[in-house]
Amino acid sequence: MKLVDEAEILVSAGNGGNGCASFRREKFIPLGGPDGGDGGDGGSVWLVADENLNTLIDFRHQRQFRAQRGENGMSRQMYGKKGEDIEIRVPVGTVVTQIENEEVMGDLTQHGQRLKVAQGGKGGLGNIHFKSSTNRAPRKATSGTPGEERSLRLELKLLADVGLLGFPNAGKSTFIRAVSAATPKVADYPFTTLYPNLGVVRVEQHRSFVVADIPGLIEGAAEGAGLGITFLKHVQRNRLLLHIVDAAPQEEGVDPVEQVQAIERELEKYDAELLQRPRWLLLNKLDLVDESERSAHVQSIIDRLGWTQPWFAISALSRDGTEQICQKVMQALDAMHEAEKEARDEAEAATRDAGA
């Protein structure tokens, strides 16, 4: 199924029910007084993150959602029934933005996380609330308030620890096949991957990480060329980027160094912070390079790039070097988790000390 990662919907909360203006009319009870009940509150609209969903395709078919209206108040001091809330299930990783003012309302990053996107209207008051010593027969009742209505943009950003970057046909899909159980399409033509693929890389029984195969980028992607920025957004969530480049000798005019630099320029245009993120270089398809020339060929690319971060020479097709990369990635992610935990603990301790 093709991944649909953006959708626009209209959500409408339920209006509040109207209050009732009525009077007691029982036999033998003269001047019974007011007994009109309140209207019920309108239902609200909630978004709920569901890990069993992985696309926003359902919103291509249904774009409008309306919660139930509150019932009107009734005589005999009977209050109207509250309108039922409506829950809209979305994939984990969905960012919710108001279209009108481009305000981000929330980011649903955990299964079961809930976000109220439209508040139901308040029920009106019945005339029992307006009786007093000077007004024993009030005929006043208030109407319910309208529920909120919002146009929302839902944007899915995949939650993966590691993202694969590179030009089309660099070998990203072959790599994810080699290290996980994911089976993306592999072929010898560009743009084979048209939507992201997620794979779980299991290093040991209880140690694993998620890797995302991002469709190939080309120069001008930040302005919409090729697959454009449609999938650049997914890279923003990755903790570690693996930049895969086809290092095999190619036809004249195709230089792996220039390809790496072109991707770097696109990352900087889209979000300069991405260039500061850990990014390892994977020189792929070295099975196509003569073994006697392989070391010098790889070192030439590294020297010309002035590369200072970790790099690996691999062949995803024959799986040479892929296991070592997975082990190194797992160690790096564990170190990141530990550093984040220490930072949280320090922040909590500072908060406690400040409040003491």
Image: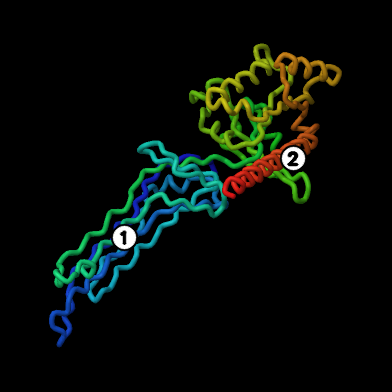
Amino acid type at image mark 1: Arg
Q: Is residue 199 left or right of residue 139?
A: right
Residue at the location (33% across, 68% down)?
81
Badge 1 element:
loop
**263 vs 70: above or below:** above
Tell me the residue that label 1 is attached to.
Answer: 69
| Residue 183 position (above or below residue 77) | above
Q: In which quarter of the image is residue 188?
A: top right
Question: Does residue 198 appear left or right of residue 49 in this picture?
Answer: right
Q: Is residue 182 visible?
A: no
Is residue 80 rendered to the left or right of residue 278?
left
Contact, mark 2 vs mark 1 (Cβ under 8 Å): no
Foreground: 299 or 122?
Answer: 122
Mark 1: few/some/many CA within 10 Å (<14, 14-19, 20+)? many
Q: Which residue, as the protein is rendered here, is positioned at the far top?
A: 252
Q: In which quarter of the image is the N terminus?
A: top right
Horizontal and vertical percent for residue 52? Answer: 57, 52
Q: What residue type is labelled 2?
A: Met
Q: In which quarter of the image is residue 157?
A: top right
Q: What residue do we see at 85% from left, 21% from top?
A: 291
Q: Mark 2 points at which residue?
A: 330
Image coloring type: rainbow
Which residue lies most toward the bottom here?
28
Q: Residue at x 79, y 20 (%)?
A: 289
Which residue is drawn at the image coordinates 17% and 64% (left, top)?
140
How far across and down, in percent of the image, does residue 352 sit? 61, 48
